[in-house]
Image (tube, helix red, strand yellow):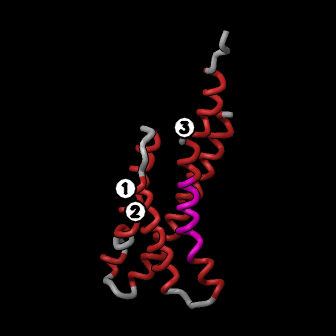
Amino acid sequence: MRVLFAVIAVCAAALLAWSVSYTYGQLRTTSESVLPANLAQWWPLTVYGPWFVAALSILRATVQHRPANRSWGVLLATSAMAVALCVSHSSHSILAFVTLGIPPITSLVCFWELVGQLSPRHRSRKGAHAQQRPEA
């Protein structure tokens, strides 16, 4: 079971890293059309900075068994912003929308799955059955 958890976590983390790096490049390319090059390389951090802070807050809340509604809202808003910004500078074809819009969504889905692996809800059922004592 732990091997499966490790494989899922590694796959989700790798795909998450690829999606963010791909999207970061797209956002940098978009910003280069309106900003000087030295600013354009850092501009995507205005989208992914809050994304990472919210992601870390969600991970902390998951480990502490606390809700993270506000952080999920920030994560969803910044992911939507990344999709909109990546797609807005495309050639307006369906293929371009899909090619540029899916990576930010993929990073969100992979992170959601990673959090799901850490969530105690899935493990508590097995533990609850093992901890129940028959009444005499």
Question: How far across and how far down the image is residue 78, in percent?
Answer: 42, 68
Secondary element at tag 1: helix
Tally of marks: 3
Residue on which the image places disc 1? 53
Residue on which the image places disc 3? 120
> In this picture, is 131 found above or below 118?
above
Q: Residue at x 67, y 9 (%)?
A: 136
Question: For the residue carrying disc 1, how many other residues have a C-alpha within 10 Å: few (<14), some (14-19), or many (20+)?
Answer: some
What's the CA distance linking mark 1 and mark 3? 22 Å
| Labelled pair 1, 2 in contact (Cβ < 8 Å) | yes
Q: Amino acid at mark 3?
A: Pro
Q: Is residue 104 magenta?
A: yes
Q: Which region of the structure is painted magenta? A: 101-112
Q: Amino acid at mark 2?
A: Val
Q: Residue at x 64, y 16 (%)?
A: 133
Which one is in front, 119 or 85?
A: 119
Magenta part mainly helix, strand or loop?
helix
What's the CA distance linking mark 3 and mark 2? 23 Å
Residue 74 marker: 2
Q: Residue furthest top?
A: 136
The tag earlier along the polypeptide, 1 or 3, is 1
The tag earlier along the polypeptide, 3 or 2, is 2
| Labelled pair 3, 2 in contact (Cβ < 8 Å) | no
Q: Residue at x 56, y 52 (%)?
A: 13
> In this picture, is 2 found above or below 82?
above
Q: Is residue 76 magenta?
A: no
Question: How far across and how far down the image is residue 44, in percent?
Answer: 39, 71
Q: Amino acid at mark 1?
A: Val
Question: How far across and how far down the image is residue 100, in percent?
Answer: 57, 77
